[in-house]
Amino acid sequence: MRIFLILPLLIMSSCFHENVVDLRKNENPSFCLFGDAGTGTEDQARVAELLKNENCDAYFYLGDIIYPKGLKSPSDKAAQNLFFKYYADIIKDRDMFLMMGNHDYHGNVDAWLEIAKKHPRLHYPSHYYLAKINEICFPVMNTTDYKLQQMLWLKSLNLEGCKHKVLLGHHPAKSSGKHKNPYFPLNLFLKYAMSFTNIYVAGHDHHLSYEGQVDGVHQFVSGAGGQLRSVNEELAVFAKSRLGFIKIVPNGTELLFELIGLDDGERKVLFSKKLISSLANH
């Protein structure tokens, strides 16, 4: 009986190697993280231009790529109208990593698996995967359709060789915006996932924030890529309803997090914080 119980786990573990994108960049690559942008509005265009001018080495799109109901198929015109129209210039010579959000799950999320195969700089190998750039590891989670297999995948990740570790997901574990704290059982999944690193960046709520620590994990929100909502600034260490993104720059043993937004139409660093990423004991 034990053999039959172990065999499925071994089969699933053998598939996890397909969930890794391993790239080499310059010595100190920078990363731009943005989300919730697929509105087709002037606000999306403004943030897209800001992102392009930032010239990061890699970009992470934290979900809700297509509002309001995702893509119907790989040939859906919404992909051109709400994604490539704004980010084609970036992915000509920069890498972009995708993640699905809850709005994308109203449609066909598998469509993005096919679209990414046609664009060398666009990465979406699976609905959850590990992006490893030099010695910096980004576990890219699926927080909309989370199952036991993803938990096993997180457990299987060998992050010991990573100098820095930053967990990415669509739903935050804490937010000073509309959605506040996640519902059950998502809160349990996030609690488990965050036990593997001490830094978590999410989208979902449409603002920029450093929420502070949740169970010892530093929580950032970057969901201001295309529209804004009000935010309760008193609930976070820092929170602003400003269009923009989060930039991460490694510096030795530290990571510099910059919340970059549009202030009166101009680029402005709204908040910055230096952190040292660490691994939990598992």
Image: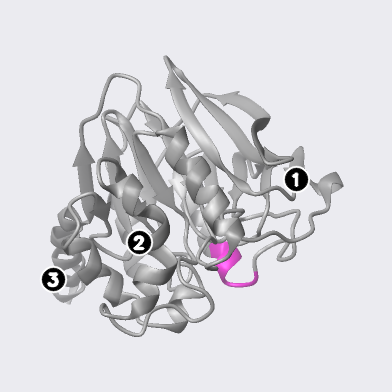
Rendered image quadrant of residue 229? bottom right
Between tags 1 and 3, which lies in front? 1
Q: Along the horizontal axis of the image, is 52 left or right of 258? A: left
Residue annotated with mark 2: 84
Residue 23 in picture, x, y percent from top left? 21, 37
Mark nearer the N terminus (2 vs 3): 3
Rendered view: 120 above or below 63: above
Tag of residue 203: none
Q: Along the horizontal axis of the image, is 139 left or right of 9? A: right
Residue annotated with mark 3: 3
The span picked out in magenta is 183-188
In magenta segment, residue 185: yes
Q: Residues within 10 Å of mark 1 (few under 14, many from 20)?
A: many
Viewer-nearest residue: 47 or 224: 47
Between tags 2 and 3, which lies in front? 2
Q: Residues within 10 Å of mark 3 (few under 14, many from 20)?
A: few
Rendered view: 227 above or below 246: below
Between tags 2 and 1, which lies in front? 2
Q: Is residue 115 visible?
A: yes
Q: How far is mark 1 from mark 3, CA to CA?
A: 53 Å
Viewer-nearest residue: 61 or 191: 61
- Mark 2 secondary-structure assignment: helix
Residue annotated with mark 1: 240
Q: Amino acid at mark 3?
A: Ile
Q: Amino acid at mark 1?
A: Lys
Q: Along the horizontal axis of the image, is 42 left or right of 110? A: right
Which residue is situated farthest in the right direction here?
Answer: 234
- Mark 1 secondary-structure assignment: strand
Quadrant in which the N terminus appears: bottom left
Mark nearer the N terminus (2 vs 1): 2
Rendered view: 32 above or below 8: above
Residue 128 in picture, x, y percent from top left? 33, 60
